[in-house]
Image (cartoon, grey):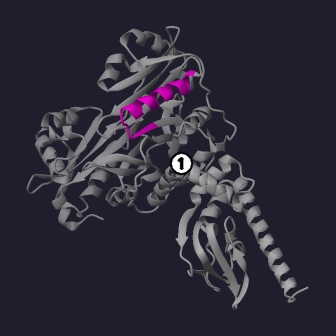
Amino acid sequence: MIDQRAQDIVCREADETDASAVTELFRAAYGGGYVHPQIYDEREVRRMIYDDAMLLLVAEHTPSHRVVGVAGVLFEMGAYSDLVGEFGRLVVDPAWRRRGIGHRLMEARIERVGQRLHMAFVEVRVGTSASPTISQSHGFVPVGALPQKLVFGGEREHAGFLVKFFGDALALRRNHPRIIPEAHYLADVALRGVGLESDVILDDEASPYAPGGSYEVTELTTTGYASLLRIERGRVHSREVFGPQRLNYGLSRLAAADSTYLVAREEGRIVGALGFTREEVERHVRVFEVIHSKEDVIPVLFQALERSCVTERIMCSEVDVGADATRMQRTLFDMRYLPAAYIPAMVFHEVERLDVIKMYRLFRPLLELPFCAPEPTLSVGMRVIRLFEVAEAGPRIRRTMARMALCDGLTEEQAACLVPLFDRRTLAAGHRIFTSGDPAEEILIILEGEAEVEANGVSLGSVGPGECLGEVAFLQGTLHAADAIVVTPIDAAVLTRGALHTLARQRPDIGSVVYRNLARDIGGKLRRADGLEKEDGTAG
């Protein structure tokens, strides 16, 4: 893994004499356009070096005393405590890349924090595959993705979300969390990825918090702080939202962290608040706390946050919700927050570690951006991106599903879980979809257009909108026994064998309905074929 030319590289903790070299390294890598400009200020870099909440490492070429790489770890605070750390940006001098320096810096970070952390996470750039490749090769496991969260060179990028555990973190995990069904895929992938059995309990009956009351929502001032703190102390054992800050740090500490609270009052009395941080450059909001004395104030607070985000042209918002807080999960889902990551054992709460669902909302249209990563980061990330594509195309998808016999009998929630598995495909007239003897690895559901099925030059019938094509061989696991040719241009939804089998394992309630509909579709075609044979006298 390590290039022999880099044998003289030493990774060590940075000291104040490295400040200038670190700024020059970022300038070489990003041309002065890094999203956080304080990295170009030597004074700010010195503060980072001396900050107990951060570990900053440099890779030095010892013969020349040249700093050729830098990487950091931020030790999270607040509800996460000091047992969770974020592996921040890893940067290597462009002239020294492809020599294993990135791997050495990653190894050095892991070695130095392994006794201090229970868990580390990293948000990797996926515009290129370097970052996810390094992270995966050192034991980080993909558990989600954050669409267009990052900014580099003025352009948006998706981020992959990966985690790594240390010590007895997973042994302290609370078992059998309750989650909404929409988060099941990510939960299953994440838990199996870190070596655990998927033990989540799906709660499809959780009701959202309903808005109510007449509340005035304003930003927190010092006059409201004491009242709000009393609410917090009264409900510390039932937290639903977690983050790296908390109200009981004190107002000055929150102000220093650029935190804001939206406070809801009823007849002048504080009844709830929502705390969040705002990242000005990346136009990103992160909710870290929701406290309340009345449940119906919760959606009111999120509605106020939404108005603020739209007004201030925020790109995205994220909320880490406890995996047992199904009502909060459902409330956010109904407000267009989607599950973007499932993080086992992230929160250390009392005597155990709780799973977290990262709910994520885009306030701008989803962009077509590259997602370059090795498996399994690629498949997990693209599944998340697909969820956002489906949500954005909601009306069109609902019209499509209404025409698909494959979806008959599915509830709205079940259908929402099925649709992201489909790929879209357009085929021109005359295109041969499959030929007798081809393997049957997918089903086509025709949305528009028509296909003709024939065997040995004899027509077996046509397939039109809402019907399946190729399902007989697909279900039997055999080769196709006929040919299928496009008659009029086709717009189709495609479901692969692997995707359907995975869904049936994860959600047998959906799988049973889909397989029943496929069998019914086959029966209808056989009856039509039998009728045609009787009409022309070839049978019966």
The residue at 31%/52% (across/down) is 106
Residue 7 relative to residue 500: left or right: left
Q: Residue furthest right?
A: 540
Amino acid type, callout 1: Ala
**Residue 259 appears in which quarter of the rendering?**
top left
Location of residue 404 in the rendering, given as x and y in whole percent from the top left corner: 68, 60
Q: Residue furthest bottom?
A: 456
User: Judging from the image, what secondary structure is the residue with disc 1 in?
Assistant: helix
- Residue denoted by label 1: 391
The residue at 55%/53% (across/down) is 189
Residue 481 makes an appearance in the image: no
Location of residue 195 in the rendering, given as x and y in whole percent from the top left corner: 54, 53
Location of residue 67 in the rendering, given as x and y in whole percent from the top left corner: 14, 51
Residue count near mark 1 (Cα–Cα under 10 Å), binned few <14, some 14–19, many ≥20: some
Compared to 425, does 296 lie above or below?
above
Report the magenta residues as a range: 297-318
Residue closest to the eye, 209 or 65: 209
Residue closest to the eye, 171 or 534: 534
Compared to 256, does 475 lie above or below?
below
Location of residue 190 in the rendering, given as x and y in whole percent from the top left corner: 52, 50
